[in-house]
Amino acid sequence: PNTIFKDIFNLSKGHMLIYQNANVKIKQYWDIDTGKMIAMDEDIIKGRVWEMFDETVKLHMYSDVWLRIFVSCGVYSSTILEWMS
């Protein structure tokens, strides 16, 4: 990926990197079991996603210092920036 830092690499989806005591470990933290998916109304799902997004942005905006955002011109950072305003 193109980043402002050298030697940055991707992790697989649903994985996290743990660096502890000079050791690196990659651990899977999430895997969707498609066998357990249930049918839901699309409008309900969209509404719930926006509720969670709104709550997450608001929780991360509590601060006693100036807030900053690194905008990459991508959809995610632009959406978060717009939601913060």
Image: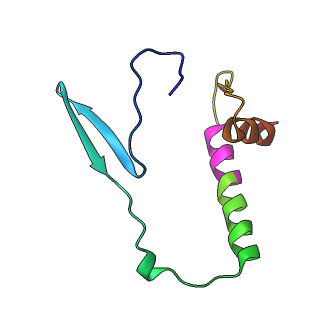
Q: Based on the displayed image, in which of its 4 quarters is residue 73 positioned?
A: top right
Instruction: Tell me which corner region of the image, top left, top right, bottom left or bottom right, holds residue 32.
Output: bottom left
Is 4 in the magenta?
no
Task: Please give left or right for residue 5 compared with residue 80 in the image.
Answer: left
- Residue that sits furthest to the bottom in the current view: 39
The residue sitting at 54% across, 84% down in the picture is 38
Give the quarter of the image for residue 18.
top left
Asked if residue 55 lies in the magenta stretch, the reply is yes
Nearest the viewer among 9 and 69 is 9
Q: Magenta stretch: give its range.
A: 54-61
- The reply, left or right, for residue 74 in relation to residue 19 is right
Residue 21 % position (x, y): 17, 27
Give the colouring mode of the picture: rainbow
Image position of 20 with respect to 32: above or below: above
Quarter of the image for the C terminus: give it.
Answer: top right
Q: Residue at x 27, y 42 (%)?
A: 26
